[in-house]
Image: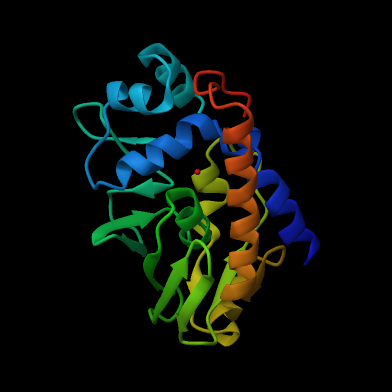
């Protein structure tokens, strides 16, 4: 595993980097799985905190998406279309980045069908990801995922997610690599291993301190 991959695994499992505590984020992801906006009251009940706890936690996550009624519609997993389609249990959702599609099956405890589009060639990449068995299928088999390090911007979506894509092949990714000399691209199976380590880290934090939803000590 490269230094960048190792660093990402450590940093993205730590909610001081991602902004939203696992005890709040994971219940939110599971509520969004229904495909409907989530109220603060629903998230408070699911996370075992109060509405004020939820407000404080979300305040540390400026990228959180809301509808015009103030309900949550996205935090890594989103109801708004992105290039990364993420279908779970027949519900069509989206993620902020390619790596999210490999992290979230374990957090949601559901297999997912992934469909993404290369930002260079426009070619479609498809994958099936199972939380226990890993990546079951990838089309084309040459597909890769781009990675960059998490920047200092308080918006993780800006500093990280917007640069983490699927590409149909290493050749397809070359223009991106030329523009991002500090980045790298890796096979989808290798990216899944990073995603699995990140999800395991987040789940361990949830198990250690399941009452920390409103205590944000630090999604796609």
Q: Report the residue that reaches farthest toward the right.
A: 3
Residue 170, position as x, y percentages in the image: 60, 83
Please indicate, yes or no, whether residue 74 appears anywhere in the rendered image: no
In percent of the image, x 59 and y 58: which residue is there? 195
Please indicate whether residue 54 sits to the left or right of residue 193 in the image. left
Report whether 58 appears left or right of 206.
Answer: left
Q: Report the residue at 31% width, 48% height from top.
A: 33
**Image mark count:** 0
In the depicted view, which residue is nearer to us: 151 or 199?
199
Residue 210 position by quadrant: top right
Give the percent coordinates (x, y) of residue 24.
47, 30
Q: Is residue 96 left or right of residue 70?
A: right
Residue 44 visible within the image: yes
Q: How is the image coloured?
A: rainbow
Q: Position of residue 94 (x, y in %)?
A: 34, 56
The residue sitting at 57% across, 51% down in the picture is: 160
From the viewer's perspective, is residue 41 above or below residue 138? Answer: above
In the rendered image, the quadrant that contains the N terminus is bottom right
Residue 89 percent coordinates (x, y): 28, 60
Q: In the figure, 107 relative to 144: above or below?
A: above
């Amino acid at each position: 595993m490269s230094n960048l991959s190792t660093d990402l695994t450590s940093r993205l499992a730590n909610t001081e980097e991602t902004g939203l505590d696992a005890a709040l984020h994971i219940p939110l992801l599971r509520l969004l799985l229904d495909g409907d906006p989530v109220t603060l009251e629903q998230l408070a009940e699911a996370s075992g905190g109060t509405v004020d706890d939820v407000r404080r936690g979300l305040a540390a996550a400026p990228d959180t998406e809301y509808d015009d009624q103030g309900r949550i519609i996205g935090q890594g997993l989103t109801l708004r279309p992105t290039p990364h389609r993420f279908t779970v249990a027949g519900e069509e959702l989206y993620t902020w980045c390619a790596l999210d599609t490999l992290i979230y099956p374990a957090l949601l405890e559901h297999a997912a069908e992934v469909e993404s589009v290369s930002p260079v060639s426009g070619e479609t990449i498809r994958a099936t990801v199972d939380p226990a068995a890993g990546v079951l299928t990838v089309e084309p088999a040459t597909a890769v995922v781009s990675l960059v390090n998490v920047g200092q911007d308080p918006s993780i979506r800006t500093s990280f997610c917007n640069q983490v894509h699927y590409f149909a092949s290493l050749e397809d990714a070359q223009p991106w690599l030329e523009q991002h000399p500090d980045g790298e691209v890796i096979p989808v199976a290798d990216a899944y291993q990073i995603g699995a380590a990140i999800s395991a880290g987040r789940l361990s934090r949830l198990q250690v301190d399941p009452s920390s939803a409103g205590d944000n000590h630090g999604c796609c």
